[in-house]
Image (tube, rainbow, N blue to C red):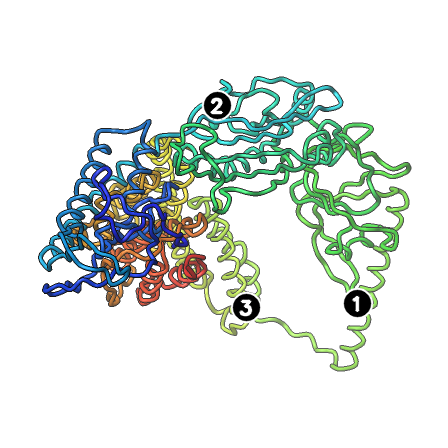
Amino acid sequence: MKAASSPDTLTSSHAAANQAATNGIAIPAVANRGAAPQEEIPTAEVPFNGELTEPLLIDMDGDGEDELHTLIMDTADGQLWLHSDKETLELFLRRKRSKHARHMTPDIAKLLNDIEVLAKKVHVNTYGTTKAANRISKKTGLPKKSQHVAATKAERIMAVGQLREIAGLLKQLNAKSADVMKKVRPPSHKEKSSVHTTTDGDTFCKEVVMHPLSLLPRDDGVMGSAPTGESKLFTALNKKITYIRGHMLNDHLHGPGTNDNLVPISTPFNSLMKTTVEAKTKEAVNANNKVVRFEVETLEWGAYKGFFKGTFLEENKLPAKFRFLVQQLERDPTKDGSETGHWKLAAKSPIFSETLVHTIPTSKETKSGTMALVPETFIPGYYFSATGTLKEVPPDYHLSGKYFINGSRFDYLFEPFGLNKSTLFSKEYDLEITTAFKMPAGYELIPIPQKPIAFIHNNNIHSTTTPEGQSFLIAKKTEQAANEAAYAVKVEEVRKAKEDEKLALEKKKTPKPEYKVKTLAELKKERWLRELGPAFKREVEKYTLELNPEFGKRFEDKQGEILIKTQEEWEKDPQLGEKTMDILMAPLKTQIARDKEELLKEQTTSDFVQGLLNELNATINSRYLPVLKEDWKKEKFNREAGAIIEGYKKYWRDLKGTLITRKREELLASVYKKLDMALDHVQRSIQKRKSETDLKTEETGEGKDKKAKTADPGPFIPNTTATISPQPDIPRFQPQSPPVSAPSLSGADREKAEELLGLIASVSHGEQALEILTENIHRFLTVPNAQSWENVYRILEKCKSIKGVEPYLMDWAGKWESMSIRST
């Protein structure tokens, strides 16, 4: 609540009846409201005990936002006051007339006259009555010829009704005045600007300050336009990599496309500006008709390294940082707001205040055929890359991709490859564009193909295969070949020593077994074990082609595990040689076919879901996004639509085999209904959130039950496999009296509430408790205060008993609890 100020002494009185009326309202004498009371006048009437006050929500200070005030009648003299700003009704109406001097409409003029007539009626007929008297004043000791006549009980009751009628007219006046004055905006005005000049003589924007910045065109005649300014620096940059002539003041905010408003910026930084400062400023000015102060300043020219990490001198001439400050302005309440001097900084947090770092371009922005400006030199050792490319362009090599040189994960391979570990050091290259590599004198590039390799570890021989991907050595070929051959000899020596050690141990522990002739069953067992692998592989290959690569790989991996398990079981089976191969393979064939059918069903479901998602994506692009013209609206809709689709995506996949039995149009109809609700929510979010009727509903609760009965319950998906728990005991929203103070909602809190609405829409499926939660969140967005926040949090806690959404609600409750408004 605003701090109370002292009433105007020219409009405070306990003797209004002694003054002539102005505009239908008595002009009080000069006296403070806190002066000593008048002498008590005896009356035979029974005093009226009701307080003559009426609460109302109007804008008294002219900042464009309504505050809670009280219309009070001074029962001593009939004077009408407006609190909490402590101002007489007469002075308030006088200011209204002055404010609308240039913009007076018939509706506003009639309302002003009606209020003044009613105020005069209350004063004269009820509390301003005097009668002749012939007595001595107890206070002054002087004769008095008249005295005030106290109102009767009936007159006081009538005054209460008239007071309420005045309050109703004041609400109408407030709404009409707001509609007129919100259209009164100043022309946009450039307060300050400067340019930065490069060493080549190019000029670019150094600083721009707009005060004020509004929907109206600029007072200097400059209009927003696409970039037209050319420069040597921009031309040189775009020979190697794409840069954009970026507006510092956006062209949709009256920013011209000339060099004094342009700076070459990277594509990623252009996207960053679009989603931050430009989105915030457009939302304030273009969507919400606010008047702001806009500042931008380019900083640290020459400190930018760019994509080429300082090797491209043209990139180094650009600024490294950009400072933005966007602040809301408020109109001087004594002015109508049509001129630039009528606006001053509002006592609110900035709409946007941040210094953004100039983002580095990616390799996608480089021109075709562009190479790194500075060549590299190979260092000796082992090179590995999973995705890199290598091309020989004598006398150099051209590399791109990520390379690991002498990485510790491959150090066991260095000696087998003929490298000296003590002379190597590791390094990584992440080559976004092709880079030339020169060969050191005496060295060669030696490719390493995929092959088995043996190495020594802890004096034991281990076998492995060279890593999949691209591997090569940078070494002196003769020296490397000699080292590799010497290591191979060392491996054979260790192998022979291990074999000799094993033979000696066996000879010592066990006697030499006598030769034993194998039975036919033993020979068959050995044969079946040899033939198992090929037979199993042939059976698997029969079904692999029925699956796509992803599911085919899963199928082969699973059958590989079954093959290993089967080999172990057959080796342990003493009766294996007495069985036929057909009998042994029969259960395996059944298992393989069953596994294939299960994966084929899962693949069909996956393809069906992907088809639904593709159709939704195409419909969003063709039906929903074209309706939203501004980018920030599209981004907001995309966030809500993404949450809805993610919920249905999980739900469809959980249906598994039963999904493909459903009709596509039935499955999509529920999603489209939720998307229509999301589109409606986005479109309504830019309008005025509260009409006069809504305000009446908030204060009295009238019409709430009817709205609850007719509300759309949301789409319901039948035959779901999810378990719907009994609804928790959650009461419907009950109207409350208007809060003493209605704090404004921060952007972060509003985003959390809107994100929660989108997530609820994606999982609700007609749950009544979640519909009640949705109603209370909309109530919170309309009247944001600690009480409406507490209502939503209490319902979130109760909704945790709904099966299937417990994980989501745990996260939602935590986000809701983190809001800043809960402490207001």
How many numbered callouts?
A: 3
Left or right, 254 with respect to 300, comes to left
The Cα–Cα distance between marks 1 and 2, rounded to whole angstroms, is: 81 Å
Compared with 257, 114 (above or below) is below
Badge 1 amino acid: Asn
Badge 2 amino acid: Arg
Q: Are marks 1 and 3 in contact (CB under 8 Å)?
A: no
**Dot 2 crowding, Cα within 10 Å, few <14, some 14–19, many 20+:** many
Q: Which mark is residue 568?
A: 3
Which quadrant of the figure contains the N terminus? Answer: bottom left
What residue do we see at 33% from left, 31% from top?
627
Q: Position of residue 682 (x, y in %)?
A: 34, 40
Q: Position of residue 538 (x, y in %)?
A: 49, 51
Which quadrant of the figure contains the C terminus? Answer: bottom left
Badge 3 amino acid: Glu
**Dot 3 crowding, Cα within 10 Å, few <14, some 14–19, many 20+:** few
What residue do we see at 61% from left, 41% from top?
355
Q: Which residue is mark 2?
A: 218
Q: Earlier in the sequence, mark 3 or mark 2?
A: 2
Q: Which residue is mark 1?
A: 458
Q: Position of residue 516 (x, y in %)?
A: 65, 74
Compared with 352, 259 (above or below) is above
Q: Secondary structure at mark 3?
A: helix
Q: Nearer the viewer, mark 1 or mark 3?
A: 1
